[in-house]
Image: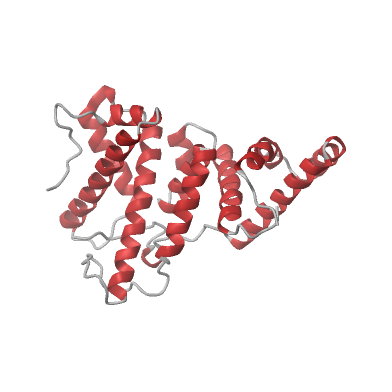
Amino acid sequence: MACSGRMETNNPTIGTLIALAELGDEASAGKLFTLLYRELHRLAKRRLARQGDVSVSPTTLIHEAYLDMAGQEGQTFPDRGRFMAYAAKVMRGLIIDHVRNRLAIKRGGAFELTSLTTNVGDAISDDKELAQISQALDQLAQVDSSLSQIVDLKFFCGFSFNEIADMLGVSERTAQRKWEKARIYLHRILRSDLPL
Amino acid sequence: MSKLTPDEWRKVSPYLDEALEMVPEERDVWLLSLTQKDARLASLVQARLDEQQKLKQESFLERSPLGAERTHGERRFSVSR
């Protein structure tokens, strides 16, 4: 069943879930992730079906999710920057699952059909490497979530520094500086054999 | 070999913020001054700055995870139908 993002009347809104997640409520964080994951996936399928295209960009999906969901919740919806940061983290999960599925198809393993069954070879990412980056990002989020958000938005979703700065309400220079710091931290985790 | 701990990161982090806003010449003078105050800290900051330059040259995390389907400058992907 497709999830439209519109909440049942007795269910919390996206705005409420984000607020609770920010207070450390793990159950709400889990619900928020599931809801956004389904919504992004639903939008991707809808777009592909409507346009007959074989692919869609993460940036387009996240923008559409924001417009759709903000339109449904109106004034109670969280600000764009907070929503984008959460949606980008969910997009990370969607992309890793997507790469994993493509690799499974390429290896003749799990029969997960995608709309694109050709040209999956040359620059395909290693799903294990992506999973390691994702784990390192989770560690970074524990230390400085503003740094991990930048990586989700830039590396996984492909937003430019200009777009990131605009949506998070910071200067482009600040977004770039946070990116540089995040890369240093992630490199230290991913290559933990390096001397300090 | 020691590893970067969250506490060590928190200690170095504000100095990195400061250093990354400076032009190289300004940074050299600043690092010299920091060395006189706290040589160990200055050494940690210098090492991270050197690492940052190396990562920049290597384009660390610059390649899209959706590289194979990058089209017209956008990262694109298909989904399970």
| Residue A172 visible in the current orientation | yes
Tell me: residue B80, above or below residue A25. below
Tell me residue A138's x, y (percent): 46, 46
B39 left or right, relative to A123: right
The quadrant holding residue A8 is top left
Tell me: residue A28, above or below residue B25. above
B67 left or right, relative to A186: left
A153 left or right, relative to A27: right
B38 left or right, relative to A172: right
| Residue B76 visible in the current orientation | no
Q: Nearer the viewer, residue A52 or B27?
A: B27
Q: Residue furthest bottom?
A: A108
Q: Residue at x 39, y 56 (%)?
A: B74
Q: Nearer the viewer, residue A193 or A8?
A: A193
Tell me residue A166's x, y (percent): 46, 36
Tell me residue B75's x, y (percent): 38, 57
Q: Residue furthest right?
A: B36
Tell me: residue A85, above or below residue B51. above
The quadrant holding residue A19 is top left
Q: Residue at x 59, y 59 (%)?
A: A191
Q: Nearer the viewer, residue A20 or B66?
A: A20
Q: Residue at x 31, y 68 (%)?
A: A102
Tell me residue B19's x, y (percent): 71, 40
